[in-house]
Image (tube, grey):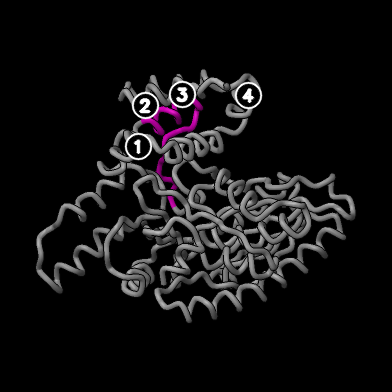
Amino acid sequence: MSAPLREPSWLSCFRSKAPPSEVARAWLHDLSPSEREEAKADAPSARAKLRQSLTSSGCPEIREDAANGYVYTAAVLRAADEVLGIPPPKARGNLRGAASGDGAPVGSRCVLSGDGNKAGSLGLWWSDFQTACRPFELLERGITHRLNMAAEVVKKFPADIEGIETLHVPMRDAFSNEREVNEGSVDEWAEQLGQALEILRRLRDAGASVNVSCQMGKNRSAAAVLVWMCSEAGWKLEEAVEHLRGITALACGNPYLIEAVAKFLNVDADVPLNPAGDQGHWICISPPGTPTATQAPVVDLAEVAAKAEAQLAGTAQTEEEAAGEELSDLFAGICIKLFGRSLGTGPTMALAARHDIAGVILISPFTSIKDLFHGQ
């Protein structure tokens, strides 16, 4: 009879509400020597894995903290930043970091390394739009091509420089409460993902290294990367999604884009929605009318929505609204600002477009894409 699995000491510290710095140090100490080296070499990914481990632990303390606005979890993650050497976020004028989630890397990430730009080998990198607009930074990483998957930024890309060529598959990111609308989007996206795969295959034949991007670096670019991983690199869809979510927070956040990937690949996959750790699951989308390359307004959609509803109904703030605002501590320093309000998808997207929101996060009562489809 096998012995029961021992709870990691860092999780025990978390459950006992130890000082956040103690939890962070215990977590780093619990890593194996090789894992510790990897964490120091790629601190943002290590931090993202810690967050994922916390939210997926299922312990009652994380659920309790979720109900309290993730205040303690956020403090632990900030302490992890300190022990990993991640500097606190700070304003940088008009140059934003990747809209990829708190602690996510500012820069392109290597998903699959190529073989030194040799014909028949493809180096695959992944980023948001702002990173893709820094071609000299891409050149330093050996990247030769940019593949943009976002329709709304096609005309915003800076001109190519010597050594960098830009290609576009202009996809839109959308999510609706109407099943028929979503089904039409899935068909459209599946066709466009086929176009992206053909481009990537041509680039592989040329021995290229390509950075795939979209507005947030989460959904459309991730869909193209998933198609390559599953079609050409032998990954299963569920495993590939989990891998990308380990790289970038809230990645693969539009369930209908994942359904389009599954349809294109002709696979029956049960991909979970991003776990929110509070009995709900995250859906993350880019609305139309997103910011320009030189403007980066950070707007708290919860506040905007509260004002809009107050004008209509004149109601006082409820406990749910207050809890939504408290979530801001968990997402400190990122450019995506939306906190749980029951506005409905349409009004939410309209507010997002009007106020130049770069990303929208919804919380679903369903746990997987299949459950979401059946629930509609």
Q: Residue at x 38, y 45 (%)?
A: 277
Disc 2: CA contacts within 10 A as few (<14), some (14-19) or many (>=20): many
User: Is residue 161 shown to the viewer in this render?
Assistant: no
Q: Amino acid at mark 4?
A: Glu
Q: Residue 290 at what x, y percent from top left?
A: 45, 67
Tag 3 near tag 4, CB within 8 Å: no
Query: Mark 4 and mark 2: span between their CA atoms?
Result: 23 Å
Tag 2 near tag 1, CB within 8 Å: yes
- Give the amino acid type for the residue marked by disc 2 in the picture: Phe
Residue type marked 3: Glu
On the image, numbered disc 3 is attached to which residue? 7
Quadrant including the C terminus: bottom left
| SS of the residue under disc 2 | helix
Q: Looking at the image, is mark 3 or mark 1 earlier in the sequence?
A: 3
Residue at numbered disc 4? 37
Start-end of magenta stretch: 76-93
Q: Which residue is mark 2?
A: 14
Disc 1 target residue: 62
> Earlier along the polypeptide chain: callout 2 or callout 1?
2
